Image (tube, coloured by chain):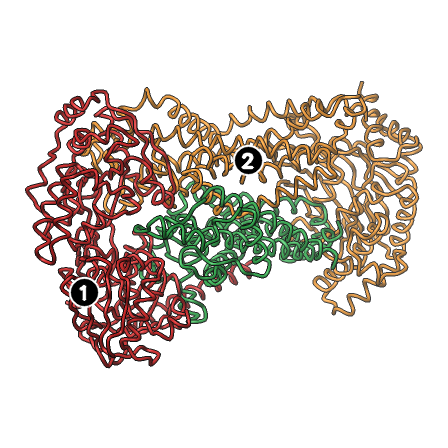
């Protein structure tokens, strides 16, 4: 906890720096940025660059074709299009900048305040934001135009006001997210004022999304400029791409080039903005991805290991005798920094009626091992193995469909976080009945009866009420029972439970374990329990494998391992889990410590 | 997944097919004599008293007969009034009415109906000005009415013919229902069922009409299309037989083999509202006004900004008609040196400052004005207004860029351009120019054809006085497919159905 | 549920009041005297004064506001300053036009956008995903009228499959109606399709990462069934975008209405603002806000149905 509080405040800064650095590695992003800079510079230095006075009327130049003297020809009033295009960049960029500034100036502070303080401030600001969104913007723009004689600055300010809700929403949601981060609490406890926290954390957190939003807003504002000119709203006091396009629009039948030039300029500029925005958005979303996956893909250094070590672990049953048999499994993840091998040659097996524990710290590859055995790896993961057998059959060689057919029939799966493993949009009943009908081809009534039956079996006394409930209506323990019911409803031969108790209260943990044990014996299933906790192993398992950094470092019967752990790491782990550690974080910390002790 | 794709594909195809088959079927049902007319603006009102002359012609002429119509030369010709006579003092106009005409609701057109209509028109917000000099409207007998005038009004018949004497059913006038349910005696009736307001109005031909020969077409469709590109596309796609055109598109129309009909409709230039120099002293000096006239190259502006669609002239009387005098067009030949010299003589060698209004409609001319006046040292500050505000406020500035409708009738032109107070001419200032005043007096003393010579003199005099700065007269242009001919009428922004003929 | 409805409706009414009042004062401040624009070229000062009085413009603005407001409550938005016809009649004539186009564009966007979104969501790195991304940038960068023009030039002028301009009411001829709104709807829908597809694709990727998807697969459900679960979870965000878009299209249809010459509320907005017809502008504002409130209310209902959790917070 304290560790996190000290470390975290610096983290966003580094992330941000690297965000820009990574941006510069994207050719598309760099090109787009260069184009935008070029447009801005063109606008700034238009007086130096333009070959002619943009407002000089030369009647002989009216709708003239491009030539040496006039690169893009003349417009309908007899002015040099190229010079007007250069000067027009000024107006266009200026207008977009105004709209963005207004949007940022109003939307971001309001959003941050609403997200950070919550309560009435949030409700009022959000209401206003919704109200602004429901105002017919075009009507107001036209009214404002009528009243101000289409004053460009005023119009762009109005556009900015209508873009405010966009800024408001992203700032608010970022602020809400940051508000929940522990380091903000820590900062509060450390006595920092709201102002300093807002300055130090919030503004930094909204920085990237605001830039992305601004790229979008600028594009919209530029589009609005042409749209308004198209509707006859606008002045001719300064050269302006929208007004040039309007001129072109009128003459496009006979002089299409007049329309082409400003359209190209505007199109390229807006596209540049869009590409900058989308590149940044990609980078920002990638930044969060490794964090999500850190559980499974601990660090980059593994990828550097060039040597492919031999397989680890041992196979103790014959193929025919095993419910699950994995031979030399490797799992690789594609990440932004290249491939990462998270499981590096794992062998294990489990016989019918046997309970196998797979123990290891977060990121040791234990869950990934089981996911690949069940063919449930996420899309960016790849696995290879010398062989995977399920129920004595080689599953690796089966087609995807055949392999898939094993799920829910031969193999059951109990996930770790009960709440996130139920679909929030469907009732619990539906989620139990659907596989029974779709996979087991039961009728609706049969499926409901079966679901009710298993729910009763897992200790739920009023199955009808639970089946009618949505996941958010039930407690974590109840949800886990539902998930177990779902896993065993298809009467599988093999049940894989991935940390089935970690997310639960201590009292519930014991009940759930007991339930699993009972079900395992009743159905004669093979049970594989993936866990952190040697306590769980001691309670329920027959055999155990210990994993670290994607390899099995030790395996044996529970008795053996507890009595004489061969690896000092195992010994530390056993020792650590006998402390009063309960939460996953505590356990992880203990495991981490154990690792440090052993390796230093 | 596949199923979703297939479903959406099927939906899209079905939609497209339904839509396609339909266009084919509607074009089949078109009878050849139907005509589809594209105009610029939606009908202002079905009530003749609230309608505009400008663009409402095609709509109202389908439904209503006028008392008096105009011929191709803008001369008043009989319609529901078979003949008319002025009293000697020209203060009583007697109209002999056509008999046997019925409105489409069955009401009979007679003197009572005419009186009611004329009173309705006199009271109308928009039609009232035509009858401003009318003090009494009386029924003489069943077929005769008289109008009493407070003074001689040489433009009255012309304005009535232009679109101010549409006769509506007295029952509908009484019921105040004209605006929504028009009832007239015209050659067509409004088909509400087939029309979609704002988009397409359909008028079906009556089986009987006293002037059948003038209206050769079957059903008349009038489609208001504000955007010139949309209008051109509609012509291209065959949805229109006639379109109100943008001058830029004339070459393309000729490529398509369409008929192109044009006539001058407006004059384009700078209107001086402060000829006496009350607000902007320099404008009171004739040399300054003349300098401005010399400074603008009207012909070049017509060719450039005006797309060549019009006639370069400095007169407000339409080119090619009685009053127009070609020899006057050289009075202010483009001559910058002379202009500068005149400015110097007037005591403004370095020019002066002026604020002028601007609005999106007038932007095409803005750069030329700024540049040309700039060469005389006249520094323009532009005040941007919305189009609505422009019409309201432009004349409160001493001078402004103007595109003003002209009239084909000389007396009406004198009235609208010179003598009477108008939004664009709030201070006619005739009193301040004795030479002008004298000529106006001569014009008013004469009658009919005899008016033309004094009006020609008046025309010359206001040019001499640099009354305003006309660059050119701009055309209104109409495209029509082969077999349909449009005759533009100066004074009507869009001609009435009478001027749209097969041939 | 009832409380939820009442709360939403109350909030909607307050919104309607605030927005229309703001528009009223803004419009009167900005536009002021409309008589010149209304009377045309030849009005005399006396006529203007008469019209002034007739329109009630000679009274204090607060009195005018109260007048408007008390009448508006009973659905009477006054008469247009252009043709002295009731505002509500004119808007009623035009609402079906805009709604036809906007609703069909929204449906088109929903159907095609969902299809594209799901396809790209299932294969985030596939070809279609790249095409989608490119299309989104191109459509974003193209000026508003380009798409419409290209459609007209191709399908109306060259191929003559659809009319280039105009609108036919549904009641007059359903097939002609469909034909008249096809091109404008497609023009409006294109950008919307891309937005929905992008939103749905991101939602798909996001939901696919969630644990319950793996659990569903582990239960043996076919990928089609799993996709339905993912779709339902990803749809709230896409639906919200769809609703926001619908609102945007209501106002943003102006350009399309002009190019296709549709007599909808967009073109009315433009012409009314050109001549400063305040009653029409106010009526349009009120109608648009009513639609917005309705759409948001519907959206809330649908979101609550999709994910019951939403209903309870």
Front in this rendered view, residue C94 or A390: C94
Q: Is residue A534 visible?
A: yes
Residue designated by label 1: B484
**Residue B21 location, x and y as percent?**
37, 69
Left or right, residue C153 beside residue C194 = left
Check the picture and name the quadrant holding the C terminus of chain A. Answer: top right
Badge 2 and badge 1 both on one subunit: no
Above or below for A353 versus A181: below
Q: Which lettered chain is shown in orange?
A: A
Left or right, residue B118 beside residue A579 = left
At horizontal 35% and vertical 23% (from top left) the residue drawn is A46
Which of the chains bears the disc numbered 1? B
Front in this rendered view, residue A83 or B92: B92
* Number of other residues with Cα within 10 Å of mark 2, as a class: few under 14, some 14 to 19, many 20 or more: many
Left or right, residue B495 beside residue C69 = left
Above or below for A118 versus C193: above
Which element carries disc 2, helix, strand or loop?
A: helix
Which of the chains bears the disc numbered 2? A
Residue A213 is tagged as 2
Front: mark 2 or 1:
1
**Residue B222 location, x and y as percent?**
31, 64
**Residue B315 location, x and y as percent?**
15, 43
CA–CA distance between discs 2 and 1? 56 Å
Which element carries disc 1, helix, strand or loop?
A: strand
Please tell me the colour of chain B: red
* Number of other residues with Cα within 10 Å of mark 1, as a class: few under 14, some 14 to 19, many 20 or more: some
Q: Is residue A289 visible?
A: no
Please tell me the colour of chain C: green
Residue A531 is tagged as none
């Amino acid at each position: 906890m304290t560790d996190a509080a000290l470390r975290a405040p610096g983290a966003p800064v580094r992330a941000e720096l690297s965000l820009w650095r990574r941006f510069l590695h994207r050719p598309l992003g760099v090109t787009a940025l260069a184009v935008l800079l070029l447009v801005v510079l063109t606008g700034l230095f238009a007086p130096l660059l333009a070959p002619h006075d943009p407002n000089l009327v030369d009647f002989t130049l009216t709708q003239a074709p491009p030539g040496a003297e006039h690169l893009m020809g003349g417009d309908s009033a007899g002015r040099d299009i190229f010079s007007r295009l250069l000067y027009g960049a000024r107006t266009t960029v200026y207008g977009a900048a105004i709209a963005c500034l207004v949007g940022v100036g109003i939307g971001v502070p309001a959003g941050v305040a609403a997200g950070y303080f919550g309560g009435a401030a949030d409700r009022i600001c959000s209401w206003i934001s919704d109200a602004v969104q429901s105002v017919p913007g075009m009507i107001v723009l036209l009214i404002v135009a009528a009243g101000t004689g289409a004053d460009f600055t005023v119009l762009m300010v109005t556009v900015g006001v209508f873009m405010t809700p966009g800024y408001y929403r992203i700032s608010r949601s970022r602020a809400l997210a940051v508000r929940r981060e522990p380091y903000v609490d820590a900062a509060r406890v450390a006595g920092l004022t709201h102002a300093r926290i807002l300055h130090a954390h919030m503004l930094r957190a909204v920085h990237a999304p605001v830039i992305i939003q601004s790229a979008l807003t600028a594009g919209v504002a530029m589009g609005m400029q042409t749209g308004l000119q198209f509707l006859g709203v606008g002045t001719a006091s300064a050269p302006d791409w929208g007004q040039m396009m309007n001129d072109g629009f009128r003459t496009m039948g006979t002089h299409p080039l007049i329309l082409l030039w400003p359209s190209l300029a505007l199109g390229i500029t807006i596209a540049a903005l869009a590409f900058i925005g989308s590149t940044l958005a990609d980078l920002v979303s990638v930044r969060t991805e490794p964090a999500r996956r850190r559980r499974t893909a601990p660090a980059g250094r593994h990828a550097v290991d060039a040597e492919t070590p031999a397989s680890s672990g041992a196979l103790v049953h014959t193929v025919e005798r095993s419910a699950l048999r994995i031979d030399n499994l490797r799992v690789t993840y594609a990440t932004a920094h290249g491939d990462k091998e998270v499981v590096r040659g794992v062998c294990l097996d489990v016989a019918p009626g046997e309970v196998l524990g797979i123990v290891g710290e977060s990121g040791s590859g234990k869950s990934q091992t089981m996911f690949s055995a069940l063919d449930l790896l996420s899309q960016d993961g790849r696995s290879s193995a010398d062989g995977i057998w399920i129920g004595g059959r080689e599953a690796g060689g089966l087609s995807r469909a055949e392999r898939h057919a094993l799920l829910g029939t031969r193999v059951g799966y109990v996930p770790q976080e009960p709440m996130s493993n139920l679909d929030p949009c469907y009732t619990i009943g539906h989620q139990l009945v659907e596989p029974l009908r779709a996979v087991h081809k039961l009728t609706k009534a049969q499926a409901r009866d079966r679901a009710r039956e298993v729910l009763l079996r897992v200790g739920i006394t009023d199955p009808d009420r639970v089946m009618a409930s949505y996941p958010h209506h039930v407690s974590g323990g109840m949800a886990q029972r539902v998930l177990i019911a779902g896993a065993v409803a298809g009467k599988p031969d093999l049940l894989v439970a991935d940390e089935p108790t970690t997310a639960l209260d201590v009292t519930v943990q014991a009940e759930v374990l007991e339930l699993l044990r009972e079900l395992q014996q009743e159905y004669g299933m093979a049970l594989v329990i993936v866990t952190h906790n040697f306590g769980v192993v001691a309670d329920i398992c027959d055999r155990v494998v210990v994993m670290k950094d994607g390899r099995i470092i030790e395996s044996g019967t529970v008795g053996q391992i507890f009595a004489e752990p061969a690896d000092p790491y195992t010994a530390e782990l056993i020792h650590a889990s006998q402390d009063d550690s309960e939460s996953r974080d505590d356990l992880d910390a203990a495991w981490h410590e154990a690792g440090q002790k052993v390796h230093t | 997944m596949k199923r979703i794709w297939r479903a959406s594909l099927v939906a899209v195809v079905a939609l497209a097919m339904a839509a396609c088959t339909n266009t084919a079927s509607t074009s089949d049902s078109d009878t050849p004599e139907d005509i589809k007319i594209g105009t610029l603006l939606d009908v202002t009102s079905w009530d003749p008293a609230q309608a505009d002359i400008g663009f409402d012609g095609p709509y109202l002429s389908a439904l209503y007969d006028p008392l008096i119509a105009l011929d191709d030369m803008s001369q008043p010709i009989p319609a529901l009034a078979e003949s008319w006579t002025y009293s000697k003092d020209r203060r009583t106009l007697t109209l002999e009415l056509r008999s046997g005409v019925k409105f489409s609701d069955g009401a009979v057109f007679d003197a009572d109906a005419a009186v009611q209509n004329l009173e309705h028109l006199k009271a109308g917000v928009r039609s009232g000005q035509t009858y401003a000099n009318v003090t009494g409207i009386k029924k003489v007998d069943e077929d005769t009415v008289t109008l009493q005038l407070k003074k001689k009004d040489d433009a009255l018949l012309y304005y009535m013919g232009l679109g101010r004497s549409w006769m509506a059913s007295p029952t509908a006038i009484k019921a105040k229902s004209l605006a929504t349910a028009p009832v007239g005696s015209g050659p067509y009736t409004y088909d509400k069922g087939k029309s979609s307001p704002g988009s397409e109005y359909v008028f079906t031909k009556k089986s009987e009409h006293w002037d059948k020969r003038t209206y050769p077409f079957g059903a008349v469709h009038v489609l208001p299309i504000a955007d010139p590109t949309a209008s051109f596309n509609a012509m291209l796609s065959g949805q229109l037989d006639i379109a109100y055109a943008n001058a830029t598109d004339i070459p393309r129309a000729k490529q398509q083999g369409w008929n192109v009909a044009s006539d001058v409709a407006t004059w384009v230039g700078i209107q001086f509202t402060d000829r006496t120099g009350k607000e902007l002293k320099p404008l009171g000096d004739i040399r300054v006004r003349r300098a401005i006239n010399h400074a603008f190259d009207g012909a070049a502006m017509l060719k450039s900004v005006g797309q060549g669609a019009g006639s370069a002239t400095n007169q407000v009387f339409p080119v090619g008609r009685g009053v127009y005098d070609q020899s006057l067009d050289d009075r202010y030949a483009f001559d910058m040196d002379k202009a500068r010299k005149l400015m110097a003589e007037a005591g403004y060698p370095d020019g002066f400052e002026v604020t002028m209004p601007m609005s999106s409609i007038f932007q095409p001319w803005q750069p030329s004005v700024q540049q040309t006046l700039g060469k005389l040292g006249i520094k323009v500050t532009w005040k941007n207004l919305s189009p609505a505000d422009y019409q309201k406020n432009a004349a409160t500035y001493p001078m402004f860029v103007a595109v003003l409708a002209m009239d084909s009738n000389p007396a009406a032109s004198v009235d609208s351009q010179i003598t009477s107070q108008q939004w664009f001419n709030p201070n006619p200032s005739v009193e301040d120019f004795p030479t002008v005043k004298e000529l106006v007096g001569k014009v008013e003393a004469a009658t009919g054809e005899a008016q033309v010579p004094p009006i020609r003199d008046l025309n010359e005099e206001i040019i001499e006085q640099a009354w305003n700065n006309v660059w050119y007269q701009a055309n209104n242009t109409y495209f029509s497919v082969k077999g349909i001919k449009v005759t533009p009428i100066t004074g009507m922004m869009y001609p009435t159905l009478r001027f749209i003929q097969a041939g | 549920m009832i409380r939820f409805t009442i709360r939403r409706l109350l909030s909607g009414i307050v919104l309607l009041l605030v927005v229309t009042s703001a528009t009223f004062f803004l419009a009167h401040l900005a536009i002021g005297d409309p008589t010149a624009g209304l009377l045309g070229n030849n009005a005399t000062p006396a006529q203007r004064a008469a019209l002034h009085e007739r329109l009630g413009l000679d009274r204090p603005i607060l009195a005018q506001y109260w007048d408007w407001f008390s009448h508006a409550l009973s659905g009477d938005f006054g008469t247009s300053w252009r043709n002295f016809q009731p505002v509500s009649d004119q808007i009623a004539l035009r609402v079906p036009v805009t709604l036809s186009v906007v609703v069909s564009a929204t449906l088109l966007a929903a159907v095609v956008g969902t299809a594209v979104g799901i396809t790209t969501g299932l294969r985030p790195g596939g070809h279609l995903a790249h095409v989608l991304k490119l299309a989104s940038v191109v459509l974003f960068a193209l000026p508003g009228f380009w798409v419409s023009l290209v459609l007209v030039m191709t399908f109306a002028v060259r191929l003559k499959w659809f009319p280039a301009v105009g609108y036919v009411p549904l009641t007059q001829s359903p097939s002609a109606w469909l034909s008249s709104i096809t091109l404008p709807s497609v023009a409006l829908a294109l950008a919307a399709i891309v937005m929905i597809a992008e939103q749905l694709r991101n939602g798909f990727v996001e939901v696919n990462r969630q644990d319950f998807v793996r659990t569903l697969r582990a239960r043996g459900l076919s990928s089609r069934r799993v996709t339905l679960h993912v779709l339902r979870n990803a749809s709230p965000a896409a639906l919200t975008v769809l609703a926001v878009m619908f609102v945007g299209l209501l106002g943003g249809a102006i350009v399309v209405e002009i190019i296709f010459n549709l007599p909808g509320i967009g073109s009315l907005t433009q012409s009314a603002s050109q001549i400063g017809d305040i009653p029409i502008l106010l009526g349009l504002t009120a109608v648009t806000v009513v639609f917005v409130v309705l759409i948001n209310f519907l959206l809330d209902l649908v979101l609550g149905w999709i994910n019951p959790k939403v209903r309870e917070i």
